Image: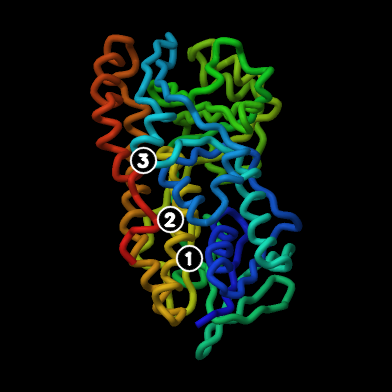
Amino acid sequence: MKHHILIAGGGIGGLAAALALLARGHDVDVYEQAPELKEVGAGVQISPNGNRALHALGVFEAMQRLSCNTVGKEVRLWNTGKTWNLFDLGTEAVERYGFPYATVYRPDLLQVLADAVRAAKPDAIHLGRRAVGFTQQGGCVTLHFEDGGSAQGDGLVGADGVHSPIRHALFGGDRPRFFGMIAWRGVIPIERVPAAISRDKATNWIGVGGHVVHYPLRAGRLMNFVGIMERSDWQVESWTTEGTAGECAKDFAGWHRDIHGMIAASPALFKWALMGRDPLAQWTRERVTLIGDACHSTLPLLAQGAVMALEDAVILGRCFDKYGDVPTAFARYEKARIEVTTRKVTGANDNAVRFHNPALATEAGAIAYVDREWSREAIIQRYEWIFTYDVEAAEI
């Protein structure tokens, strides 16, 4: 059977779900609240399992042309800059997992997905339509918009992000808790990046109470900068609040000159509070389900947020292939994904302690700690189950 599916939200998860369903012959309409499709101007890491999902969606090659395949990964100590080279994420990732470890610019990923959706159905994406709730009756779902309008379909996917009105209508309000950290982000033109900074590696700076991640974007033309610091005085969960280089530099006082060089080189710096939500025990009710951040928002400490949304979309499409009716397809999708996404959310929480451990206060303590926690064997043990996850073979 072919169905008409409504999707609330035109971000990465919503467009990926639309693409997965359109490719299978279903009719899809995506309703996005913003007047234009727009992603936060920041980087995202796409691990091999995420690239496997992009391949299943038919956009891997298009995305590869805009991404960077990192040649490796390194850990650097917060104050001295001492460097440990981790196992190769370039050639070895392809040999071991079948797909590369890539870094991409979020707006590029959104554009690739949007282009593919519009190629399948030119008028699938409706802008300026803010969803506020829904009703279900019989075999129909009605999505209600802020402007008083509505749309009807056979099913509804809530892809409306961390503050999801669809989730709220399904299960009530959530209670996010502040993790005592704020995040800084900036995107730097590569010519402004300090000369000592690696242009082709993903780098984790680790220290007591904070860490920094940076990696190249857009075939090496940009450098993504993310700094996370323990602070209790800023608890605004917004991705568009701009801070100052002076405030960011103060947060990282005493850190290596390369960090301060990137802070000074960033054309703009944005800050947001890291808030956590307990994973939902249920995503679906009859003809309505959730996807991506709407059901499993995560701290940005495992590099799996966007990847989980892509994987969700592929599994959702496969469930529509296997199960004929919408409620069953949604229920089987939830069952296939809820355990693995919960494990990833928990893993991201665990990394907060790993990145900010007190042992990193001194170089001697850091050497022993990194040798234990960041050895090849330790990394493979932590990440192998993530990188080998196969969206096209996972049980549904």
Q: Where's residue 47, x and y in %? A: 44, 40
Quadrant in the rendering for residue 394: bottom left
Mark 1 and mark 3: span between their CA atoms?
29 Å
Quadrant in the rendering for residue 241: top right
Task: Determine whether label 2 and label 3 are within 8 Å by CB.
Answer: no
Kindly state the secondary structure of the residue where label 2 is placed.
helix
Q: Is residue 192 left or right of residue 309?
A: right
Q: Where's residue 213, x and y in %? A: 49, 27
Q: Where's residue 111, x and y in %? A: 67, 49
Which residue type carries mark 2? His
Kindly state the secondary structure of the residue where label 3 is placed.
helix
Local crowd size for mark 2, using a 10 Å CA cut-off: few (<14), some (14–19), many (≥20): many
Which residue type carries mark 3? Tyr
Residue labelled with disc 2: 296
Residue labelled with disc 1: 290
Q: Where's residue 119, x and y in %? A: 68, 61
Which residue is rendered at x = 55% and y = 86% of the image?
140
| Residue 82, numbered circle | none
Q: In the image, which is nearer the foreground, mark 1 or mark 3?
A: 3
Task: Determine whether label 1 and label 3 are within 8 Å by CB.
Answer: no
Q: Is residue 330 left or right of residue 378?
A: right
Which residue type carries mark 1? Leu
